[in-house]
Amino acid sequence: MSRIILVAITLFSVLSFMLQTAGYAEYTSKSDNKPHELSAQTVYFMPHGDFASIADNGTGGLVKTDITDLFAENFRLWIESGYVRSGSSVNEVNYFYMIPVMASFDYSMRLSRRVTLSPVLSVGYTYVNLSYRKNGSSIYETKSAWEPATSAGIDLDFSISRNSSITLGSRYGAVFEKEKNMYFSMFTAGFKCRFNIYHK
């Protein structure tokens, strides 16, 4: 899985470089050319409470696309999805993974010329898949469902050029299942590029 994530980030970096060299990453403040952002991140996942009895710490990746200054200056809306997987130290559980599909909102605050802090709130659904066995059976069964989810946290952007930055973040969230809520933390690190879609 770590190799897949590394390849994905490498391909994303090549794509962002191509966008910039092609002239699509040139920043402009014109109202009809609002800058867009693409981001790819690796994830370290930590379940808490009852969740930790099902899943171990895991890894994954997230991709998001942003529309900046959508309603007000520095306010951003983005759509985020990805894949997070973990094994389990419990014999009854084989593996666990989830695929979140979230709408996220943040407000960016510039701390210095190159550093930006952004509180983040995300809401949406996540596809949860659990492979387990009942009552000592040797056969694993699979349980899967779309469940509502939410998370909140902080992102830090470290600018490395006019149109690209390194991102670090943390989240605390919950998956709302019928039986009980499952709580988790995520730590992220990745790369972000900014580009414009020109309107003629």
Image (tube, helix red, strand yellow):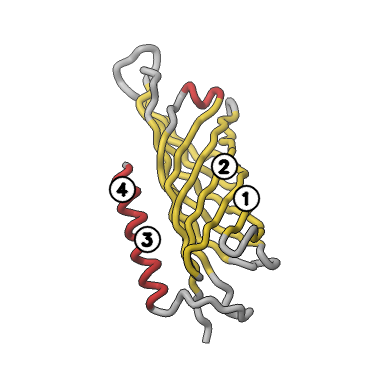
Q: CA distance from mark 1 to mark 3?
A: 23 Å
Of 120 and 103, which appears nearest the observer? 120
Point out residue 169 in the picture as x, y percentages from the top left corner: 54, 47
Residue at which label 2 appears: 171
Q: Earlier in the sequence, mark 3 or mark 2?
A: 3
Please report contact status of discs 2 and 1: CB closer than 8 Å, yes or no: yes
Q: Earlier in the sequence, mark 2 or mark 1?
A: 1
Residue 62 rendering spot, x and y as whole percentages: 45, 50
Categorize mark 1 by other alpha carbons within 10 Å: few (<14), some (14-19), many (20+). Answer: many
Seen from the viewer's position, the closer of residues 128 and 82 is 82
Residue 68 position by quadrant:
bottom right
Residue indicated by mark 3: 12
Q: CA distance from mark 2 to mark 1?
A: 8 Å
Q: On the rendered image, what quadrant is the N terminus found in?
A: top left
Instruction: Give the crowd class for mark 3: few <14, some 14-19, many >=20 residues within 10 Å.
Output: some
Residue position marked by numbered label 1 in the rendering: 120
Helix, strand or loop at mark 3: helix
Q: Secondary structure at mark 2?
A: strand
- The kind of residue tagged 1 is Val
**Which label belongs to residue 153?**
none
